Image (cartoon, grey):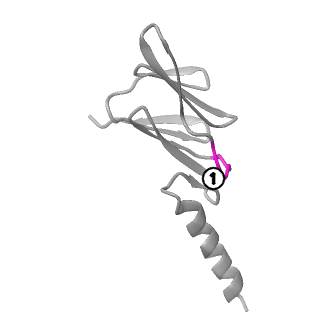
Amino acid sequence: MHRPLSSLVVAGILASVGCGGVTSVILGEVEADVAGHHVLVTDCYRTSPPAPKRLPDENGLPVYEYAPCRDAVLRLRGAELTVNGTAYGALGAGDEVLVDHGRVSIKRTR
């Protein structure tokens, strides 16, 4: 009797994480690669978040923005990271960014 419901739950989980790890509605996570940096945002329950955008250069520096949720707006200007308007310094090549319920962590790769 519980088999059909459990099958639907498993199918929903697989469908939400099966798209290349881009979004997991069940877990409230979205992720993307932004200018060579892997970004994971939690507490974001969108089925299809917008992709990162390349904005016009500023003073010769490339600018990227990733705003998967209203309360998570990441911007890279060159290597400088800001999240929701707060500066977090320069990222190194391949560094990863986690925005977990508004708290920002950077995993340094070097």
- Quarter occupied by residue 24: bottom right
Point 56% across, 36% down: residue: 103
Looking at the image, how many numbered discs can be counted on the residues?
A: 1
Q: Seen in the image, is 63 located left or right of residue 108?
A: right
Q: Which quadrant would the C terminus be assigned to in this image?
A: top left
Residue at the limit of the structure toward the top, as seen here: 59
Tell me the element at label 1.
Answer: loop
Q: Residue at x 33, y 28 (%)?
A: 92
Q: Report the predominant secondary structure element of the magenta stretch.
A: loop
Above-or-below relation of 57 to 11: above
Report the residue at 57% width, 48% height from top.
30
| Quadrant position of residue 15 | bottom right
Whether 60 is drawn above or below 66: the answer is: above
Residue extent of the magenta highlight: 43-49
**Above-or-below relation of 97 to 76:** below
Q: Mark 1 points at which residue?
A: 28
> Could you tell me which quadrant the N terminus lies in?
bottom right
From the top left corner, tell me how far across and down residue 31 is, in percent.
52, 46
Which quadrant would residue 7 be assigned to in this image? bottom right
Q: Residue furthest right?
A: 1
